[in-house]
Image: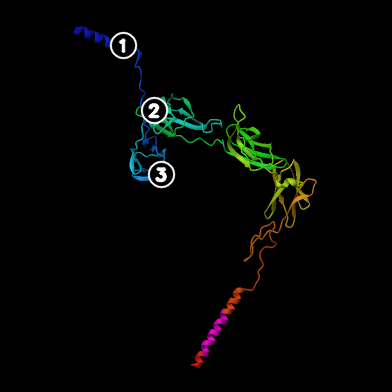
Amino acid sequence: MTGWIRRSLVVLGSLVAFSAAVTGPAHAEPAPPATLQHGVFIGCGFVDVVMRTSSPDTHLFEFFDNGKRVWSKSLMGDNQTHEPAKEGHTYRLNHEGNLDGQVVYHRPAACDTTHLTATVSAEPTCAQSQQRRVHVRNDGATAVQVSTSGIWQQFTDFVEIAAGAEHDFVGTWSDYLVIGTPDAPLPYAVLPPIPPTGCGVFTSRLTALCGNQVRWDVGSEAIADQSLAIFREFGPIPQTPTPAWLGTLPANGKLTVYAPVVKGDTVLATEGGLRDGTQDPYVAQVLSQIEGYDEPAVCARPEQAAVTYKATCTTITATITNYGAEREFTVTAGDETVNTVTLTRGDVATVEIPLAAGATAAVAVSGQDAFASYQQHTCPSATPSAGSTGNGGGGGSDGGGLPITGAPVAWFALGGATLLLAGAALMLAARRRRL
């Protein structure tokens, strides 16, 4: 009986073992997550410094090179940086005065047997302006495991690049180009930041014009097209912005556009538009704004334009801004016509006018009387005499300086001192006679 039970248990055990071998375990436990590291780690020519607090409070970190403190920083949360490293030097990181990591730097052999080059650029889209592209070429003789993903010494998504081959890593976010080694991933090179793309960096000028209209001059050196919009906000109660103009700014382009508005509107010139497939407005950023549109004051005058003057000793510069319909302006110096310029609505022109002392510069709508004039005055002497002060042209006083008025004070002072000494001598002589 005992032998039969023993044989039955052996058979049953064999069946269970066979079943397990065929079907595998009923439930496999996931591998425990890797622990994020902190401290000082060796790279190729530098050390990776990982400072982790997992705390919203500030913590003091200090970094030392051969016992000499290199820097001290108060940080919150988790941070990472890198420092250049020299052979044989000891690098230490302290956290709130306690040792947080230390290494003696010895350059790994893989740094010199691996030959990679990397270039960083931005993906050609402004919708994802921070999307990074790292182009890596393997100039070595053997294949290399390469990654540009990961942080705090936990690197992922390695790709094998064969000798002489190239690979593009898109959208990755590590500070380093990392290579796989038998011991551990090794930071091979520090990746530069994405070069400026121009996305989000605009030139923008929004001008209120006559006739319930605004003009928008906008440009960008972006690497891709960008969606733009002019919105109107109106009424005492905030309402959904109403698009007055929608369009696209071409890559590395400039635009001049006009939009109708109403008195009192808040006008927003934006990077934005309507969400795809909807009439819902969105604003990525406001580039220029007019609070409460009203026609410029010059719109009430016939010329509907404004002129400002800037004077030097030899020339006058007239800046003309046209707020009305397109028209031609004539610029004169005395009786002579210096220039004629045709300006569309919102255009600005700058004209230099050579002008003799006492002559008058003027700007007029062609065929009409001048509406803005300026008289040049005598420029001050280049080397004013002692005691004088010079005045600039354009309204300054005539002449090369202030005239000398009043008596010659130095001579009066000398004469007074002489009389005072003579009086003192006479008094001393009189006293001696009495004695």
342 or 142: nearer the viewer:
342
> Residue 232 in magenta?
no
Query: Can residue 431 be seen here?
Result: yes
> Residue 422 in magenta?
yes
Front label number (1 vs 2): 1
Whether 358 is drawn above or below 224: the answer is below
**SS class, disc 3:** strand
Whether 395 is drawn above or below 227: the answer is below
**Label whose residue precedes the other's in the sequence (1 or 2):** 1
Q: What residue do we see at 76% from left, 43% from top?
A: 328
Quick one: label 2, few (<14), some, or many (20+) residues within 10 Å?
some
**Label whose residue precedes the other's in the sequence (3 or 1):** 1
Gap in Å between the C-alphas at discs 3 and 1? 61 Å
- Decide whether the magenta segment is chiefly helix, strand or loop: helix
Residue 7, how many percent across, how many down?
Answer: 23, 8
Quickly name the residue at label 3.
74
Residue 71, how many percent across, how many down?
Answer: 39, 45
Front label number (2 vs 3): 3
**SS class, disc 2:** loop
Query: Can residue 317 be seen here?
Result: no
Quickly name the residue at label 2.
180
Residue type marked 2 = Gly
Q: What residue do we see at 24% from left, 8% from top?
A: 8
Residue 110 horizontal side relative to residue 171, left or right: left
**Label whose residue precedes the other's in the sequence (2 or 3):** 3
Quickly name the residue at label 1.
18
